[in-house]
Image (cartoon, helix red, strand yellow):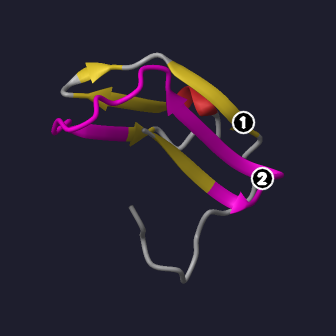
Amino acid sequence: AGMHIVSEWPGQALKVLGKTQLPANEWTHVAVSYDGSGKAAGVKVYYNGVAQQLNVEQDSLSGSIKTSVPFRI
């Protein structure tokens, strides 16, 4: 599990994924926080309340992330 924050993909975006794969056939509580810094280091991902190590796949956010598109999970 992870998170994308996008102004324009792929050049202006953040993408981070937890290094640990979620278990199959088991409920897992996933929470994500973001500090607004524009950096992947500002994103935290938690599985069942435990902070995860992250793979950063994109770390080049600039510009606004304001959009008229609805929030999606």
Q: Helix or strand or loop: what does disc 1 sit on? A: strand
Instruction: Check the image and report above or below for 45 versus 8.
Output: above
The residues bearing labels 2 and 1 have C-alpha atoms spaced at a distance of 8 Å
At x 61% / y 32%, what residue is drawn?
40
At x 38% / y 61%, what residue is drawn?
73
- The spot of residue 38 in percent (x, y) is 64, 42
Quadrant location of residue 68?
bottom right
Q: Residues within 10 Å of mark 2 (few under 14, many from 20)?
A: some
Q: Which residue is mark 2?
A: 12
Please report the bounds of the magenta region as a residue range. 6-32
- Does 35 sit left or right of 11 as displayed? left
At x 72% / y 38%, what residue is drawn?
58
- Does 70 sit left or right of 6 as displayed? left
Identity of the amino acid at label 1? Asp
- The spot of residue 48 in percent (x, y) is 19, 28
Instruction: Check the image and report above or below for 63 versus 31.
Output: below
At x 20% / y 36%, what residue is drawn?
28
Q: Which residue is mark 1?
A: 59
The dot on residue 7 is: none
Identity of the amino acid at label 2? Gln
Task: Name the residue at the right extreme.
Answer: 11
User: Is 73 within the magenta?
Assistant: no
User: Is 12 within the magenta?
Assistant: yes
Q: Residues within 10 Å of mark 1 (few under 14, many from 20)?
A: some
Tell whether label 1 touches label 2 (CB within 8 Å). no
Say which quadrant the N terminus sits in: top left
Quadrant location of residue 63?
bottom right
Of 64 and 22, the residue lying toward us: 22
Task: Name the residue at the bottom extreme.
Answer: 68
- The spot of residue 12 in percent (x, y) is 77, 52
Of 37 and 10, the residue lying toward us: 10
- The spot of residue 25 in percent (x, y) is 20, 38
